């Protein structure tokens, strides 16, 4: 984890530091450095901050807390992510109106229980563009929208907690924009719009990579989208729910495992979210055998490409029919 953290932080900050010196004069190098930084940003998000905010990076709480701020350094917000991901997504996986990952603009439909619109029949085509915009949305408006919604849901109920979190989040974002965008605009001999475009390319890379990895783990033909009964209760136990709503992919790829923080083992992550991702490979047989023993599904796609193809099929299915069935 330490080696990966150093590599990913260097991959992200190295190009930006070079851009901030003002020594780059080749437009091709400008875009290349921002794109490299985008891969580093993805690595921080999936392989460093994700474990840290789950409290699984290290046994030491202080280390987890400090490394959770790596998300703030790349423009996100650890406080918002902790509620959105740790609480809402991991507790209510694939439950419409509860799992925050299913909350999407009206032109996207991630659940058979969501309202259907005519444009959804094309979402499997245009979805990739909006996936690439996901981190741009996070660093600009979405974190603020979510923070207010989470306050209204009762998550930020301590005295002045919402105000303090809002001020801190705004300060972190100003800091991020200052070194990642404003400083290069000041120092580099390029038009501002070219630097902005290169900055956006960085986020296009990150947004597309991160969105695909998280979405192909849940929005799949084999996974279920359960709903609570009239009393608001779920029929399945929590572990059974995680097995039914989550999919692994490309389990034999050591390279992919390292690059995306073990998130190709999403089943292991969802049933053991407080375990560091470096252990997932060794746990997979135990988890799979346990699922079989108790008659629970254990979804696996042989490759990432197959997972993306099946995810695309699911998006198309969700777009063509108002209700595709609820398990």
Image (tube, grey):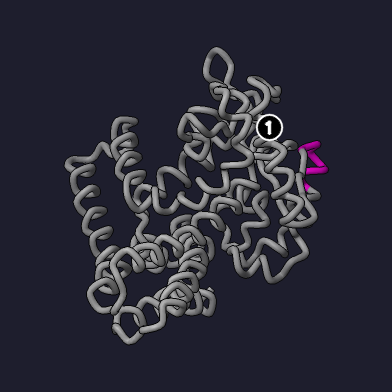
Q: Is residue 163 left or right of residue 243?
A: left
Q: Position of residue 18 (x, y in %)?
A: 36, 83
* Residue 78 horizontal/vertical position (percent): 37, 54
Q: Secondary structure at mark 1?
A: loop
Give the residues drawn in magenta, as a range. 290-296
Residue drawn at x 56%, y 31% is 109
Q: Is residue 104 above or below residue 325?
A: below
Residue lying at 58% horizontally and 50% vertically, measured from the top left? 214
Name the spot of residue 173 as percent of width and height, x first: 27, 58
Q: Quadrant of residue 21?
A: bottom left
Which quadrant of the rendered structure holds the C terminus? top right
How far across and down, in percent of the image, does residue 147 sit?
31, 41
Residue positioned most to the front:
191
Question: Residue placed at 36% from the left, 67% from the top?
Answer: 194
Residue 278 visible, this orientation: yes
Which quadrant of the figure contains the N terminus? Answer: bottom right
Looking at this rendering, what residue extends furthest in the bottom direction? 23
Asked if residue 298 is positioned above or below residue 62 in the image, the reply reads above
Sort mark 1 into few (<14), some (14-19) or many (20+) by Cα contacts within 10 Å: many
Q: Residue furthest top?
A: 230
| Left or right of residue 171: residue 28 | right
Query: In this picture, is 293 found above or below 194?
Result: above
Q: Which residue is mark 1?
A: 224
């Amino acid at each position: 984890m330490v080696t990966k953290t150093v590599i990913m932080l260097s991959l992200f900050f190295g190009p930006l530091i070079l851009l901030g010196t003002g020594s780059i004069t080749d437009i091709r190098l400008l875009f290349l450095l921002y794109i490299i930084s985008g891969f580093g940003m993805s690595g921080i998000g999936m392989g460093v901050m994700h474990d840290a905010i789950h409290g699984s990076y290290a046994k030491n709480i202080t280390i987890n807390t400090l490394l959770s701020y790596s998300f703030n350094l790349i423009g996100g917000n650890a406080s918002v992510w902790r509620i959105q991901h740790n609480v809402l997504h991991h507790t209510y996986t694939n439950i419409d109106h509860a799992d925050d990952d299913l909350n999407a603009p009206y032109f996207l439909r991630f659940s058979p229980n969501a309202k259907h619109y005519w444009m959804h029949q094309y979402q499997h085509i245009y979805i990739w563009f909006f996936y690439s915009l996901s981190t741009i949305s996070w660093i600009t408006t979405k974190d603020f929208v979510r923070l207010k919604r989470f306050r209204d849901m009762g998550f930020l109920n301590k005295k002045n907690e919402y105000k303090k979190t809002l001020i801190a989040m705004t300060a972190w974002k100003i800091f991020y924009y200052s070194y990642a965008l404003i400083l290069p605009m000041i120092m580099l001999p390029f038009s501002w719009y070219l630097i902005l475009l290169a900055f956006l390319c960085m986020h296009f890379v990150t947004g597309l990579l991160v969105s695909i990895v998280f979405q192909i783990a849940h929005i799949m033909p084999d996974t279920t989208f359960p709903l609570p009964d009239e009393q608001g209760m779920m029929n399945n136990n929590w572990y059974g729910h995680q097995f039914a709503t989550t999919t692994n992919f490309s389990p034999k790829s050591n390279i992919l495992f390292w690059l995306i923080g073990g998130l190709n083992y999403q089943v292991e992550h969802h049933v053991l979210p407080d375990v560091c991702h470096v252990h997932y490979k060794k746990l997979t047989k135990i988890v799979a055998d346990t699922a079989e023993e108790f008659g629970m599904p254990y979804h696996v796609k042989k490759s990432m490409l197959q997972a993306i193809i099946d995810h695309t099929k699911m998006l198309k299915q969700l777009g063509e029919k108002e209700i595709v069935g609820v398990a």
